[in-house]
Amino acid sequence: HTPELTPVDSLPECAIAVDVLRATTTMATALAAGGEAVQVFSDIDLLKKESSAWEKEKRLLIGERGGAKLPGFDLGNSPLECTPERVEGKRIFISTTNGTRALQRIEKAKVVLAAAMVNRATVVQYLLDKQPETVWLVGSGWEGSFSLEDTVCAGAIAHGVIQKSKIRADEVAGNDELISAIALYCQWQDNLLELFHHASHGKRLLRMEGYDDLKYCSDMDTLDVLPIQHEVGVLKLNS
Ligand code: MLT
């Protein structure tokens, strides 16, 4: 689903937000680098208000709109900036154009996860272990529209589950979007970075000298972390 196409009258057992470029990649990276938690906001003023209750040394503000860092924030949304020196032990307050909105759309599901290419294998393993009855993969897209990078990541997750559970592709009970996401992944799995060059947000980031981010975000299965929602809007590592 893109957020706008996500049903509003029901919720799945497990909802997975996907914003490969770059919010969920950044969240996974920040938690892998020792961040205490990631707290998600669509409203910038609310983020500023809530974060001000935290000691300065214990908080880090990540803010992005249109791919650029927001004034007054510590970092833009580049996962490469989330080094252990910067994030260790800190509560990360984050607001981005689309990714945080996707997470808020699904925040009431029983289980809420954040997935990207970097932690795909860990998400696949979680789904195999827990076998949730219904799973939504919610790509953030860009301001409501389809995005190649989120769709291919959804396909990569579904493909991983199918392969490891040895079910046949035609036995998958997915909607048309999922079937096409799997096909997209099968077509591009060895050339993800190239696919990201075709993506509209990939092009936007490249115009902003984001090549290193694109490369990092397209590398699959590099982080063994699972950001999972502990209370509404707050993600921590699954323990
Ligand atoms: C978003 O939430 O729209 C993205 O993560 C944008 C970005 O690349 O920073």
Image (cartoon, helix red, strand yellow):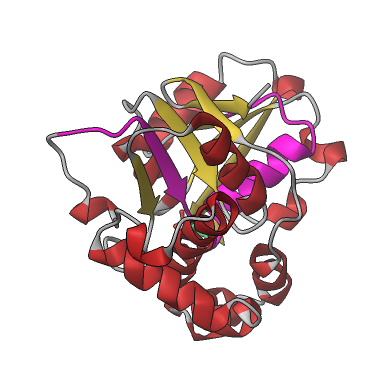
Q: Where residue 167 appears, x then y in whole percent?
A: 46, 56
Left or right: 188, with 167 as reference point = right
Left or right: 199, with 3 as reference point = right
Is 100 colored magenta in this rendering? no
**In the image, is residue 128 above or below residue 91?**
below
**In the image, is residue 181 above or below residue 12?**
below
Q: Residue at x 72, y 26 (%)?
A: 90
Left or right: 34, with 209 as reference point = right
> On the image, which quarter does residue 112 sit in?
top left
> On the image, which quarter does residue 35 sit in?
top right
Q: Where residue 118 appears, x then y in whole percent?
A: 67, 55
> On the image, which quarter does residue 68 sit in?
bottom right
Q: Which residues are magenta?
A: 10-38
The residue lying toward the viewer, choosing from 57 and 88, is 88
Q: Residue at x 81, y 30 (%)?
A: 88
The residue lying toward the viewer, choosing from 149 and 159, is 159
**In the image, is residue 228 above or below residue 212?**
above
Q: Residue furthest left?
A: 9
- Locate the C terminus by quadrant: top right
Q: Residue at x 56, y 20 (%)?
A: 52
**In the image, is residue 147 above or below residue 238?**
below
The residue lying toward the viewer, choosing from 105 and 207, is 105
The residue lying toward the viewer, choosing from 202 and 66, is 202
Is 30 colored magenta in this rendering? yes
- Locate the N terminus by quadrant: bottom left
